[in-house]
Image (tube, grey):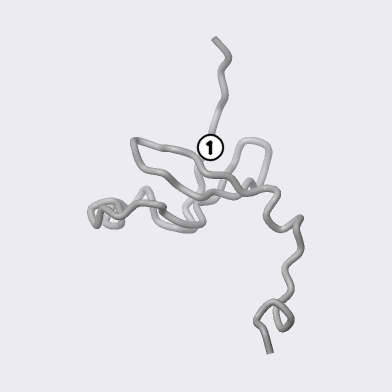
Amino acid sequence: MPEELMFPSVGTDFEKQSIIELNGVQLLVQQTDNSQYEIIRLMSSDPQHYLDSQLCPGQKITMSFSIN
C-alpha cells in the first residue's frame, strides 16, 4: 500500500512553511505566530551548521520584514 494512502497529507499543512536564509544557511521554517517561526529542517550540507545550537530544528526565531 502506498505511503500516501496510509498517511495522507493536507495541503494546508505546508502553507505556513517556507525556506529562508539565516546567517548564510537555508532553513525550512514554519510560521507559528505572526512573527514567530519554528525551524523544521536545515537545508545545508555543511556539518558545521548542524553543530550550531541556534539552528537546531525546534528552535523558535523571530523575523521582521523591512521594505526599502
User: Label 1 sits on what residue type?
Assistant: Thr
Name of the residue lying farthest toward the bottom: 1
Q: Residue at x 72, y 68 (%)?
A: 9
Q: Residue at x 62, y 36 (%)?
A: 35
Number of other residues with Cα within 10 Å of mark 1, as a class: few under 14, some 14 to 19, many 20 or more: few
Screen quadrant of the N terminus: bottom right
Front in this rendered view, residue 19 or 53: 19
Q: Locate residue 25, reporting x and y percent.
A: 36, 42
Q: Is residue 15 above or below residue 11?
A: above
Quadrant position of residue 36: top right
Task: Report the side of 42 relative to 37 (left or right).
Answer: left
Task: Report the side of 66 relative to 10 (left or right).
Answer: left
Q: Locate residue 32, reporting x and y percent.
A: 65, 48
Quadrant position of residue 22: top left
Front in this rendered view, residue 62 or 28: 28
Screen quadrant of the C terminus: top right
Q: Is residue 2 above or below residue 32?
A: below
Q: Locate residue 60, reporting x and y percent.
A: 51, 48
Q: Residue at x 53, y 37 (%)?
A: 62
Front in this rendered view, residue 57 or 17: 17
Q: Residue at x 30, y 57 (%)?
A: 50
Q: Is residue 24 above or below residue 18?
A: above
Q: Which residue is mark 1?
A: 62
